[in-house]
């Protein structure tokens, strides 16, 4: 799972992470409200965030969505292999781009690529039950809530539950 192909949507190009992207993404990853349901607290320092974002030991891949018309990144989507033909996905939107369908459009492109382009069989996401917007998005994309794990992870806000969402290749529209 090392190649990061460019993906396109109606409004965006999803390209590999590049030096400098950390500046646009830092607004989201340093915001306490947006980082509330992440496994770690907000970043306070852009250098620490840069090290996290470009960590060579992480086994996943990152796509950055930029508008076709140009401009700064608007969304980050990630995929990491969790076994043969199984991927976990994650995502965050840059502040100011919420409620515009950005994450939905980018996730659709990523999910389609993983299923159709790479032959992945199963995609899943791990989301805090209190993250209403993220849970609604996954449900609306056809993911099934498969599990509720109680106090599954200790984070910067204490012990947190998690919902596991899953989607199988044959459940994704052609």
Image: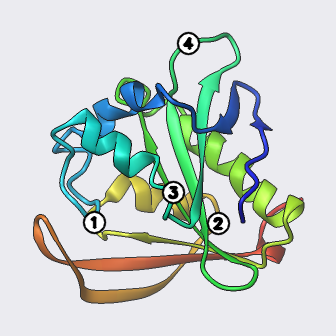
**What residue did someone put label 2 on?**
142
Instruction: Give the CA separation, mark 1 to mark 4.
Output: 29 Å
Q: Secondary structure at mark 2?
A: loop
Query: Quadrant of the rendered structure where residue 88 is?
Result: bottom right
Instruction: Give the CA separation, mark 2 to mark 3.
Output: 32 Å
Q: Secondary structure at mark 1?
A: loop
Kindly indicate whether the residue at mark 3 contacts the one at mark 1 (C-beta within 8 angstroms): no
Q: Secondary structure at mark 4?
A: loop
Instruction: Give the CA separation, mark 2 to mark 1.
Output: 24 Å
Q: Nearer the viewer, residue 8 or 23?
A: 23
Q: Residue furthest front?
A: 56
Instruction: Give the CA separation, mark 4 to mark 2.
Output: 31 Å
**What residue did someone put label 4 on?**
71
Image point (24%, 50%), residue name: 35
Image point (15%, 40%), residue name: 44
Reading the chain from its start, which is encountered first: label 4 or label 3? 3
**What residue did someone put label 1 on?**
39
Kindly indicate whether the residue at mark 1 contacts the one at mark 2 (C-beta within 8 angstroms): no
Residue 164 appears left or right of 95: right
**What residue did someone put label 3 on?**
56
Locate the N terminus and report the quarter of the image it occupies: bottom right
């Amino acid at each position: 799972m090392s190649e990061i192909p460019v993906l396109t949507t109606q409004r965006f190009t999803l390209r590999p992470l590049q030096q400098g992207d950390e500046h646009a993404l830092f607004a989201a990853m340093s915001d306490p409200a947006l980082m509330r349901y992440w496994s770690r607290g907000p970043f306070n320092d852009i250098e620490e965030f840069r090290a996290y974002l470009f960590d060579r030991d992480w086994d996943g891949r990152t796509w950055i969505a930029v508008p076709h018309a140009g401009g700064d990144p608007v969304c980050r989507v990630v995929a990491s292999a969790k076994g043969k033909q199984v991927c976990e996905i994650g995502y965050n939107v840059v502040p100011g781009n919420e409620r515009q369908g950005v994450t939905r459009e980018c996730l659709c492109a990523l999910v389609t690529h993983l299923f159709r382009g790479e032959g992945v069989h199963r995609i899943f996401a791990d989301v805090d039950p209190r993250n209403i917007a993220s849970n609604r998005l996954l449900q609306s994309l056809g993911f099934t809530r498969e599990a509720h794990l109680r106090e599954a992870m200790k984070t910067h806000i204490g012990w947190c539950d998690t919902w596991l969402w899953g989607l199988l290749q044959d459940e994704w529209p052609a």
